[in-house]
Image (spheres, grey):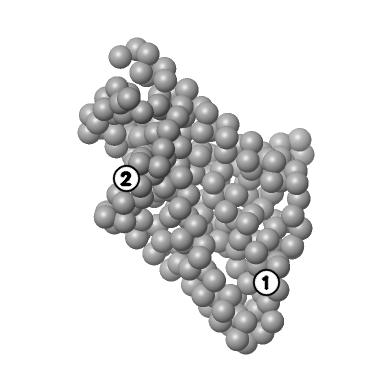
Amino acid sequence: MFAIMKKEFKSYLLSPIGYIFIGLFLLMFSIFFIVTIFNYSVVNFEYLFYNGATILTFITPVLTMRMFSEERKNGTEQLILTSPRSLTSVVLGKFCAAALIMLITEAFTMIFFAILKYFGNPSLVVALSTLGGFFLLALAYISFGMFVSSLTENQIIACVITIGVFIAMWFLPGLAPALEPFSLINMFDKFPQGMISISEIITYVTFTILFILLTIIVLQRRKSVK
């Protein structure tokens, strides 16, 4: 797994993908930061991540759309399916590499915390709660995007489906209150309030594990018919 993770992580850094993801996120985050500070005079770091969660919805496919679809398109999927490494280690390696890119992105957002700390007194505890919840949301998004990427060889289709499902999740609570647990972005709302809810954590972790397993199943079935 670690060999795959290292290879995939290097591929993010040796290609524009990783830099595009980090750059897009920080650019849009910076815009929201400036607007929030000057228009609303808000100096709470955690408030910025309400917008950050929206940004994540649209740019997560930058990390995930090529994970397996590119392998299928280039014909290198055969090497994965016939590799002595287990499919589980391949999937986890790719997932962890993307998660590491996300972790680096979050680390950069602490620059904004430092700026706010200079002008005000943002709570470090609430900031850490927010970052933790945001990372769990990101992991859930990455796992789903990876699953969609395993279903098609077209990166654009993988991107559109992933974003479409994420947007649809926003409206689930409005359709029926019982669907609220499936709205990942709405569950994030508690973390910027400093509320670490066990139910939200369990839901994020369960969602992430589910789509990692589904990705493995998809690849295993494809391997069995080769």
Q: Residue at x 40, y 42 (%)?
A: 2
Q: From the viewer's perspective, is residue 38 above or below residue 89?
A: below
Q: Residue at x 47, y 61 (%)?
A: 105
Determine which residue is flagged by label 1.
124
Task: Decide: few, some or many residues near mark 1? Use Cα within 10 Å; few <14, some 14-19, many ≥20.
Answer: few
Splitting the image into 4 quarters, where does residue 49 fall?
Answer: bottom right
The one nearer the camera, 40 or 67, is 67
Q: Secondary structure at mark 2?
A: helix
Q: From the viewer's perspective, is residue 84 above or below residue 47?
A: above
Q: Quadrant of the C terminus?
A: top left
Determine which residue is flagged by label 2.
7
Task: Decide: few, some or many residues near mark 2? Use Cα within 10 Å; few <14, some 14-19, many ≥20.
Answer: some
Q: From the viewer's perspective, is residue 25 above or below residue 91?
A: below
Percent position (x, y) of residue 12? 33, 52
Q: Residue at x 40, y 26 (%)?
A: 86
- The kind of residue tagged 1 is Leu
Q: Secondary structure at mark 1?
A: helix
Which label sits on residue 15? none
The one nearer the camera, 43 or 98, is 98
Percent position (x, y) of residue 131? 61, 61
Can you see residue 156?
A: no
Residue at the farthest bottom position: 119
Answer left or right for 65 relative to 79: right
Q: Quadrant of the N terminus?
A: top left
